[in-house]
Image (cartoon, rainbow, N blue to C red):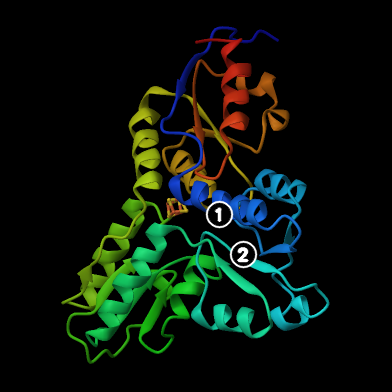
Amino acid sequence: MCYNTFMKITVIKPYGFCNGVVYAINLAIKTRVSNPQTPIYVWGPLVHNHLVIEQLTRNNIITLDQSTPLKELLKPLDKGFLITSAHGVSEDISKKIKMLGFKHVDATCPLIKKMHIQIKKELADNHEILFYGQKNHAECLAVLSIDSEHIHPIYDYQKSTKLLLKDKSPAYFAQTTMILNDSLNMYHSLKQDYDGLRFIAANCNATSTIQNNLITALPTVDAVIVVGDKTSNNAENLISIVKKHNKTAFFIETIKDLNIESVLKYEKVALVSAASTPNDIFEDVIKTLSKFGD
Ligand code: SF4
C-alpha cells in the first residue's frame, strides 16, 4: 500500500494544562511537600487524566473510588488530607469531610469558584437558575448541590419540560466545559420558553479558545488527532466538533495508541490537546508525527 509520507501538520494552540488543572496539581503537590508524613487522598480523580493520577500516586497522593459512600470510604483510613477535584464540590461534602476528621483541601478551579459565586448572588437576589450541564458530571453535581430547589438542570432541550417559574428573569448558566456554540444554542432554545432568561457568561476561555481554533482549522485539514483521556469531557467535546464537521477523528491518550499507518492516509492532519493532557504527552505526538511531515 502506498502512503502519503509528507503530511501537512497543524498544531492547534494553546495546548498543555489549563490554569485550573495547574492550580489543582500544584495544590496537591504543595500539600504533600508541606506534610511529608501525613496521608493525602483525593476524592475521585483530581482531573480527568489517568497519567496525572498515576503521577500523584507516585507522590503518595492516593485517589479514592468515589462510588463508595464517603463515610464508608474514609472510615478505615488514617486521618489526613482529603483533596476534592478541580470540578468543584458541594458544601455538604466539605462539611462531611471535616466531620469525619479529615482536613479538606478544595482544588476547585478558580473559574468554577467564580461561577459558584455568581450563582449564589443570583439566588440571593431571589432568581431561579437554569443550568445547562452534563448529567452526573462532577461540575454539574456540585452546582446543583448549591440549591437543588432553585437551580434547574437542563441536559437536553427536547427532553426538558417547561417549568412554571414565578421569576420573570431567571438566569442561565452552562457548565464551563460545554461547547460555547452549544451553550448559546441551548440559551436561544430556552429563551422561547422563558422570555426574560438572562445569559450569564461562565464558559471557560481556555476551552473555548481551543475549540474556536480547532473550528477555524477544520476546513483546511482532512483528519484530527485528539490527545486526551477517555474520561475527559473536554476531549469528548473536541471529538464531537471534529465529527460535526465531517472530518476523521483519532482519539488517543498517548502516542502508543496511534496507528501511524491509518494517519498516513491523510495529507493534512491537525493535532489538538484536551486541557488536562500533560504537555510532554502532546509533544511526543507532535515529535512522532513531524517525522512524516511539517
Ligand atoms: S478547563 Fe477551564 S474550567 Fe475546567 S479546570 Fe480548566 S480552566 Fe477550569
In the image, residue 286 above or below residue 78 = above
Report the residue at 39% width, 52% height from top.
179
Name the spot of residue 108 as percent of width and height, x first.
49, 62
The kind of secondary structure element at disc 2 is strand
Report the residue at 68% width, 83% height from top.
100
- Residue 27, label in figure: 1
Work out which quarter of the rendered image holds the N terminus and state it. Answer: top right
Name the spot of residue 244 as percent of width and height, x first.
43, 43
Report the residue at 75% width, 63% height from top.
39
Q: Can residue 222 be seen in this view?
A: yes
- Residue 83, label in figure: 2
Q: How far apart are marks 1 and 2 (CA)?
A: 9 Å
Label located before the other in sequence (1 or 2): 1
Is 171 left or right of 44, judged from the image as shown?
A: left
In the image, residue 94 above or below residue 263 = below
What amino acid does circle 2 point to? Ile
Observer-nearest of 221 and 134: 134
Is 36 left or right of 168, judged from the image as shown?
A: right
